[in-house]
Every structure is written in C-alpha cells, then in structure tokens.
Image: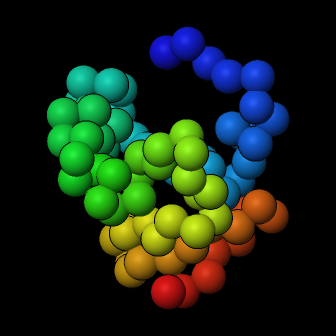
Amino acid sequence: MGGSRDPEINSPANIVLLCGSGTEGCHGWVESHRAEAYEDGLLVYRIDDPSEIPVTLRYGTVYLDAEGGVQRC
C-alpha cells in the first residue's frame, strides 16, 4: 500500500513472485507471518539493500541481483 517514488523498488533484486493473494497461498503466508517472512528475505525493510538480503527459497538460500539472477549464499 502507498507506493514509492524510488525507482529501485522495482529492481529484480527486490521482487519475488509469490502464488496466491494477500490472504491465501504463499502471498497469504507472507502477510500472515511477517516476522518469519523478514527472516527468510521474502520481505525487505525499505532501508535495506535487497541485493544484500539472503532469500530462502524451496531450493536453497540465495541472493537476488539487479539483473534478475541469483547467487548461492
């Protein structure tokens, strides 16, 4: 909600595709378990650089980069 004028908001390093809506599926889980989602890198605080936050996915923990790639941790 709200949005931002920061162009980095839509950087590939700051985007994870989640199934479901804000109340069901993976997206619903993130919204219902925000503390755990921050720990897993599925949510990132605005002050953080998302390319420096490890993201835990089904196949392991990775860093997302600005080109849309992943780097293993």
In terms of image quadrants, where is residue 61? bottom left
The single residue placed furthest to the bottom in the displayed view is: 73
Looking at the picture, does residue 50 appear above or below residue 24?
below
In this view, the residue in front, 24 or 68, is: 68
Answer with left or right where residue 52 lies relative to residue 65: left
Looking at the picture, does residue 34 appear above or below residue 53?
above
Residue at 30% across, 50% down: 37
Residue at 33% across, 25% down: 22
Answer with left or right where residue 26 lies relative to residue 53: left
The single residue placed furthest to the top in the displayed view is: 2
**Residue 45: horizontal and vertical position, in percent?**
47, 44
Answer with left or right where residue 26 lies relative to residue 69: left
In terms of image quadrants, where is residue 52? bottom right
The single residue placed furthest to the front in the displayed view is: 47
Looking at the picture, does residue 64 appear above or below residue 73?
above
Residue at 80% across, 64% down: 67
The answer to whether one can see residue 30 in this image is yes
**Residue 6: horizontal and vertical position, in percent?**
76, 31
